[in-house]
Image (cartoon, grey):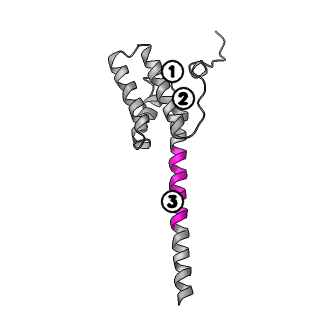
Amino acid sequence: MNDVVKIILSGIGGCVLTILTQIITKNFYNKKELLISFVESRYDFTSSNFLNSINRVPILFNNNKKVIGALERLHDSLKRDPYSEENNEKLFSLYLELCKAIFVKPVKKELFFQIFNNKKV
């Protein structure tokens, strides 16, 4: 009887561990996808892609005070003047905090703001 209990507890422990691992992996994947979407649409604050990614930040990073603080500072800056150069600084600060939160090495500021466009003018 003692061995049966050990086997059952072992099975339950394995299931719990598997479920927790899946939750953590999915959460990381969602955060990484948000970062990709954020970077892809960083040049147009009014695009639906940018708005979708920025609106997901409070949900996916709700436990990270630095990310939420950077988001609030960007929001306040955009409210004051949507065309201010200060917005770029706040945008980059948010990008840095997002990268730190998911352990991604950020690119340099110059590269972050570099536009890659291979269309002929």
Side (left or right) of 35 relative to 121: left
Q: Residue 90 lies in what quarter of the image? A: top left
Mark 2, secondary structure of its residue: helix
Q: Which numbered mark, 1 or 3, is in the foreground of this view?
A: 3
Which is more N-terminal, label 3 or label 2? 3
Residue at the (33%, 20%) spot, across then down: 79
In percent of width and height, residue 1 lies at: 53, 90
Image position of 77 with respect to 17: above or below: above
Q: Which residue is mark 2?
A: 39
Q: Residue at x 54, y 35 (%)?
A: 99
Q: Which mark is residue 64?
A: none
Q: Alpha-carbon neighbours of circle 3 within 10 Å: few (<14), some, or many (≥20)?
A: few
Q: Quick check: marks 1 and 2 in contact, CB under 8 Å?
A: no
Segment tinted magenta in the rendering: 16-30
> Label 1 to label 3, Cα distance in Å?
37 Å
Q: Main secondary structure of the magenta part?
A: helix
Nearer the camera: disc 2 or disc 3 = 3
Is the C terminus in the top left, top right, bottom left or bottom right quadrant?
Answer: top right
Q: CA distance from mark 1 to mark 2?
A: 8 Å
Nearest the viewer among 58 and 107 is: 107
The first of marks 1 and 3 along the sequence is 3
SS of the residue under disc 3: helix
Q: Which residue is mark 1?
A: 43
Q: Which residue is mark 3?
A: 20
Name the residue type under label 3. Answer: Leu
Element type where label 1 sits in the image? loop
